[in-house]
Image (cartoon, rainbow, N blue to C red):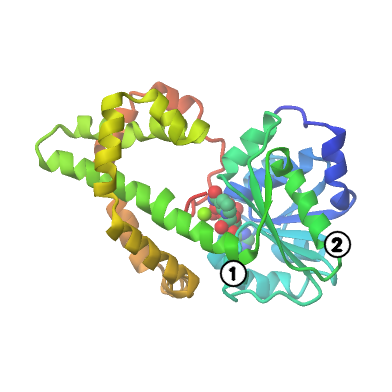
């Protein structure tokens, strides 16, 4: 493991939490990354998990003391709730609210439960948010190389008068302050995060990939060729966008590709798509999506499971698995994330 990055600036920015007890509930994608980064930033971290789970073993292997969520809540000055969103309301009622001491801070990495009222935190608590704009493995990897992932932060409730210092100290502790911190509200973080993962990042992008693949295959082209064209090469384009926006992409693709992009792209993703995007955003804003997801989860996820199964058995997955088995470099640098169940959502 790399040595903990040290800089006086960073020590100063985690000041509000130095000597305080930080509890982290959940040790999955975000939980593990936050806990490791906070500890490397000199903070005192305890992990709260149900006994016997697979991630509890991982947390112990990583050298953390692990206890039941209620016990960790009772012993924390700041408690980060990093379990899956849908288990948080019950966890709050049973393990957090009765135990977290007066004046403590309650931190989330996504504003969903507080924004839609599934969790109504006690009035004496500071309620804050730090949402890294990237998956946990990246939050850890960037920290280890002395960088960080940009984070949104927000204060929902400032009972102590120090909520902002505390949330900034946490963001600094996970490495977010090394790149960029953007202040937001629980509402803006929640609504934009849901929209991004539904319309563009996860839902939009994968639907575009699958439909492109299907169009080529039904027209008689080889599935292997369609796979490279519609899924594999997407990364090359996304990397260019990430590094330097549209200009960087235009710099690296051919003139023929540019002309095709500029004239055909708007025919594929068009005014009707925009209208659908507005509808999706509307359902996020009026709470329709959150109510539907809560009901689905409560019913045991029948629709979620069926739709996910359809994705996992899509022909592009069979072709892709065979082709990726020959890409040795993919196995070498795989995310060092723990064996946690991945949530069905993006960054
Ligand atoms: P995850 O599914 O990767 O990990 C969940 C962890 O919680 C696991 O350690 C699991 O064992 C534990 N857990 C599950 N049920 C529990 C319970 N009842 N009591 C105690 N522990 C329990 O979760 P994640 O993807 O890291 O998401 C955590 C939070 O971070 C969510 O609010 C999510 O919206 C937010 N977030 C996630 C990402 C991401 O990239 N995954 C990005 C930004 C924000
Ligand atoms: Mg998201």
Observer-nearest of 35 and 229: 229
311 or 214, nearer to the observer = 214
Residue visible at 82% across and 71% down?
159
Give the residue at x 69% y 47%: 181
Give the residue pinned by disc 1: 113
Residue toward you, 79 or 219: 219
How far from the left and from the top, in percent, is residue 113? 59, 69
Q: How many marks?
A: 2
163 sits to left or right of 301: right
Mark 1 neighbour class, 10 Å CA radius: few under 14, some 14 to 19, many 20 or more = some
Return the disc, 1 or 2, that comes first in the chain's sequence.
1
Question: In front here: 314 or 196?
Answer: 196
Q: Is residue 243 above or below residue 115?
A: above
The spot of residue 105 in percent (x, y) is 79, 64
Q: Is residue 313 visible?
A: no
The residue carrying mark 2 is 162
Spatial CA distance of label 1 from label 2 is 23 Å
Q: Is residue 128 visible?
A: yes
């Amino acid at each position: 493991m790399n040595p903990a990055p040290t800089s006086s600036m960073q020590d100063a920015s985690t000041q509000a939490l130095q000597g305080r007890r930080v509890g982290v509930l959940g040790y999955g994608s975000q939980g593990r990354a936050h806990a490791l980064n906070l500890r490397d930033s000199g903070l005192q971290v305890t992990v709260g998990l149900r006994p016997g789970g697979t991630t509890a073993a991982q947390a112990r292997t990583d050298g953390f003391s692990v206890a039941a969520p209620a016990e960790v809540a009772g012993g924390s000055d700041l408690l980060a709730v990093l379990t899956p969103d849908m288990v948080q309301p019950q966890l709050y009622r049973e393990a957090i609210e009765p135990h977290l001491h007066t004046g403590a801070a309650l931190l989330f990495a996504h504003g969903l439960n507080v924004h839609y009222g599934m969790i109504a935190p006690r009035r004496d608590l500071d309620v804050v948010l730090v949402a890294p704009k990237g998956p946990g493995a990246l939050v850890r990897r960037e920290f280890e190389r002395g960088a960080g992932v940009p984070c949104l932060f927000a204060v929902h409730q400032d009972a102590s008068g120090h909520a902002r210092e505390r949330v900034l100290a946490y963001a600094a502790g996970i490495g977010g302050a090394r790149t960029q911190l953007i202040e937001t509200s629980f509402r803006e973080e929640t609504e934009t995060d849901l929209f991004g993962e539904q319309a563009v990042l996860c839902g939009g992008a994968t639907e575009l990939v699958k439909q492109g693949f299907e169009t080529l295959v039904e027209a008689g082209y080889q599935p292997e060729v369609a796979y490279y064209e519609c899924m594999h090469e997407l990364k090359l384009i996304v990397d260019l966008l990430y590094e330097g926006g549209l200009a960087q992409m235009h710099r690296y693709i051919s003139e023929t590709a540019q002309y095709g992009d500029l004239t055909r792209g708007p025919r594929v993703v068009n005014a009707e798509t925009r209208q659908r995007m507005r509808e999706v955003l509307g359902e996020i804003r009026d709470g329709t999506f959150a109510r539907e997801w809560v009901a689905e989860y409560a019913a045991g996820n029948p629709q979620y499971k069926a739709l996910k199964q359809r994705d996992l058995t899509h022909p592009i997955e069979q072709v892709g698995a065979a082709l990726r088995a020959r890409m040795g470099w993919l196995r070498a640098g795989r995310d060092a994330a723990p064996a946690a169940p991945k949530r069905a959502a993006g960054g």
